[in-house]
Image (spheres, helix red, strand yellow):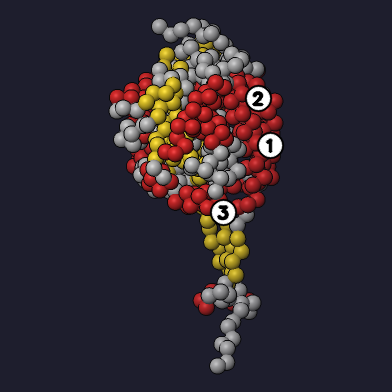
Amino acid sequence: MPLKPTARLELSDIFSACFTRRDGVPVFKQFISGRWVESSDHHAFEVDTPIDSSVIAKVQAATIEDVDRAVAAADRARKSMRDIPAIDRIDILNKARHIMRDHREEFVSTLVLEAGKTPSSATGEVMASLNRVKMTMEEARSVFGEYIPGDWSEDTMAKFALVVHEPLGAIACITPFNYPLFSVVAKVIPALVAGNTVVVKPASDDPLVALLLARVLEEAGIPSGAVNVITGHGAKVGDRLVSRDKIKMITLTGSTAVGKRVASLAGMKKLHLELGGKGAAIVAADADLQLASKKVLEGCLKYSGQRCDAISRVFVEDTVAERFTGLLVKELASWRVGDPRKDGNNMGPLINREAAERVQALVDDAVSRGCKLVYGGKHKGCYFEPTILDYVPASAQIAVEETFGPVATLIRVRNLDAAIELTNASRYGLDSCVFTNSFYTAWRVTKALEEGSVTVNDAPAHGVGYFPFGGNKDSGIGREGVGYSIDEMTRLKTIQFNLAPAGLGKTRQTPKM
Ligand code: NAP
């Protein structure tokens, strides 16, 4: 029996097209081919808030036919989208940014409810999304293309080439639960800036803000079919979406398991995969331990550790490990877990009960293998205590698998070489950091780590995404970033001009010997 909602989604008239209310619960529609529609079999599923597990909305359970309709709409809109002058595309996106800014409080409160974020973290996500839209529009110029003179090669002496970036066509954008607005923005906006169309499949745990964003884009004047959002469970909807030939690129942010499945079904499509991570923090003996303890704890606990760039292993040199652990425990005083809407709580729930139970199993496994439980270690419903584990053996599951929970996993090491070796032993290679006061150590460690990104003297954080971001090994393929994403969402065409017939081509004067 679902719980009664303890909080109501309060949305203004602009969003009334997206849903109807039944028994007081908003039932959201999907956005396909410029229309808000129910699923073809009129089946909807519940979205509940991890704050207290009550139902806050329902969304359509897309059918295979719905997926096909969305893909066909995106494919049809390809030409009109490509032919809109860039200045007009930018104009539409700029309007969308202003509408979203005017309604930012609704985005924040929806994020708090559906994802269990604190208002300050939800505000951070909305502001980062607004900034990402702005910066992506400004960066559009960086992909104008290139002029290449032919006279560097004997056989192209009389030619030159223009290398132009072209849109790919329909792009499938599949997003995870942890940044349900930002990850959609980071895919959809560069796709549209580059002249593509999209079919978005948001995570089933918190799909509402993606639908609100579609409504904002509609209001701003995006052509019909250029943006489509379907909701439904990944295994059914996702499989169908990624295997359609009319989809020309898949950009997925999610777990490695789903990434591998998508890659196996994709066929001849461009793939951009932002997948799981097992971020390490390496604390050198010469580090500023006060700074390191504050940043490491933040890296482990922010959004209850549900971040791909979370620190989920801490390698600390033996000689300073005792002091460092003591400082970490002191830092815990500034962390309070509970209903994220209540003042003073800076850590909310995990996304659902299964997630909390999975983290519990990882912690219990580590304890059963002899690690020391320094603090926390238990969950109640979706809420997991901030937890510190020390002397974790490298063989424990929590030292190997992605944690996605608020746990600082301390592994004591003899020296930095051991820390580097253990970090690189992971199948993941996304994001790590090192704390040291020595430039030489910073350089040595950052060069040696097989990660997509390494931060010195701070926890990994990517904010608006101005720097490129992405993983190696099982952490993914490709890079996201303000300009990098636009680049990934275009293909190159080489146009050659032969100047010889007009007598304008260069000829080579063979130098006299
Ligand atoms: P997930 O379970 O892999 O789901 C991600 C998305 O894929 C959801 O929309 C999901 O839909 C969909 N999906 C599931 N099965 C699919 C299939 N067979 N075909 C196509 N799509 C499918 O991940 P999550 O739990 O939402 O997010 C957490 C994961 O994302 C973590 O592993 C985290 O590290 C990773 N992540 C990586 C980055 C990065 O930048 N590298 C950033 C954020 C998160 P349903 O929700 O309906 O199942």
Marks 2 & 1, CB-CB < 8 Å contact = no
- Mark 3 falls on what kind of element? strand
Ligand 1 contact, mark 1 (Cβ < 8 Å): no
Q: Which of marks 3 and 2 is nearer the N terminus?
A: 2
- Measured as percent of width and height from the top left, residue 4 is found at 49, 6
Question: What residue does disc 2 label?
Answer: 104
Count of numbered circles in the view: 3
Alpha-carbon span between mark 3 and mark 1:
22 Å
Question: What residue does disc 3 label?
Answer: 165
Alpha-carbon span between mark 2 and mark 1:
15 Å
Q: Is residue 474 left or right of residue 101?
A: left
Question: What residue does disc 1 label?
Answer: 94
Taking the spot 62% from the left edge, 33% from the top edge, the residue there is 128
Q: Pick the residue in front: 315 or 129.
A: 315
Which quadrant of the view contains residue 197? top right
- Mark 1 falls on what kind of element? helix
